[in-house]
Image (cartoon, helix red, strand yellow):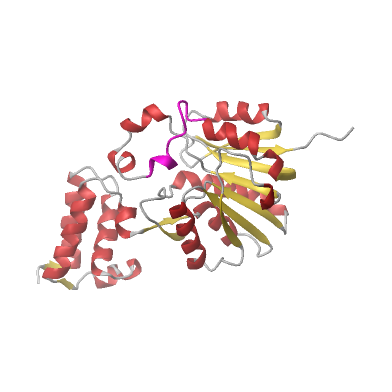
Amino acid sequence: MVGTISDVYLDLRNELRHHGVTSAPLEAKELLAFALEIPRAEFNERSGSYLFDEQLKRLNELKSRRLKGEPLAHIIGEWDFYSLTFTLTPGVLIPRPDTETLVDAGLAFFSRRERGRMLDLCCGSGCVGIALLKNLPDTISCVFADTSEEALAVTKENLVRHRLTFRGLTVAQDALKPCDPALGKFNLIVSNPPYIPTGDIPGLDVSVKDYEPHVALDGGADGLDFYRAIAANFKDALTKNGMLAFECGMGQAQQLEEIMRENGYEDIRILRDFSGVERVVTGVRTPPEKM
């Protein structure tokens, strides 16, 4: 025996803080619960229990990985987003709180609709589309599209985890190419595409540039390649008055607004995230009237 869970937690929290981990209290709790294979909800009530050598060895291995820069979400294999827990692998982006603004935009769009279809384009873990489905009527379905086989496999796993397989379909679709007409029409397309300028990637935090998939980060020279392609190539996949909603990086909203305007979208709106950053841009597709 080496000490109680409470004692080991305090030591781990302090060590993570010393190494610059900003959310040390949360991460220490997550790592310790994972090492002990106990539900996070039971952590506090077990705080007086003792650890043994094998458990401490496992904890030290996990701690070493974290201190080298590996994201906590990859270590424990899951992460919370929109009050839901998602299975993750190193081949998909870790869901971030900023992206919850994209979910909010989708929920607002469907607030007066009882039926419909949506497309989660560049779906990654499927977190955006699944969060929407969990908060919308059963009469609304979602197609999840990505080029990564690993991302589609993770999305399928998350659909099973959240009991949504009957409302979700995964397909291989390149966001830089025209939408496959066989997919049909959508009332809503949501997308959190790669938007980091290529030249900025080497300067990203180690936990991002060394551990997250570059294919999900690299948005081209100016970070806008996917926005240009999707705005042009997917507008005909929208129903009349259907909406396209993008997440974007800091400082990109005005450029994205112009891209959408050039492609014929109307009622373009910019939404701020919880930090006040312009994070989501939406536009409505109104086809020209027939002569």
Query: What's the magenta bit mostly, secondary-structure-wise?
Result: loop
Quarter of the image with the N terminus in it: bottom left
Task: Give how far across and how far down residue 54 sits, in percent.
Answer: 14, 69
- Residue 64 visible to an observer of this rendering: yes
Residue 16 located left or right of residue 268: left
Task: Give how far across and how far down residue 194 sits, in percent.
Answer: 47, 38
Q: Say how many tags the image has.
A: 0
Residue 156 located left or right of residue 212: right
User: Is 217 included in the stretch rendered in magenta?
Assistant: yes
Say if 238 sits above or below 58 in the image.
above
Front residue (pair 271, 165): 165
Say if 134 sits above or below 99 in the image.
below
Front residue (pair 87, 34): 87
Task: Give how far across and how far down residue 8 sits, in percent.
Answer: 16, 62
Answer with the quarter of the image where residue 197 lies.
Answer: top left
Q: Which residue is painted at 19% across and 44% down in the image? A: 19
Task: Give how far across and how far down residue 219 sits, in percent.
Answer: 47, 33
Quarter of the image with the C terminus in it: top right
Q: Which residue is painted at 30% across and 41% down in the image? A: 210
Question: Which residue range is magenta in the image?
Answer: 213-224
Answer with the quarter of the image where residue 280 lies.
Answer: top right
Q: Which residue is painted at 29% across and 56% down in the image? A: 75
Residue 251 located left or right of residue 270: left
Name, please, the residue furthest toward the right: 291
Front residue (pair 30, 121): 121
User: Is 43 included in the stretch rendered in magenta?
Assistant: no
- Residue 125 visible to an observer of this rendering: no
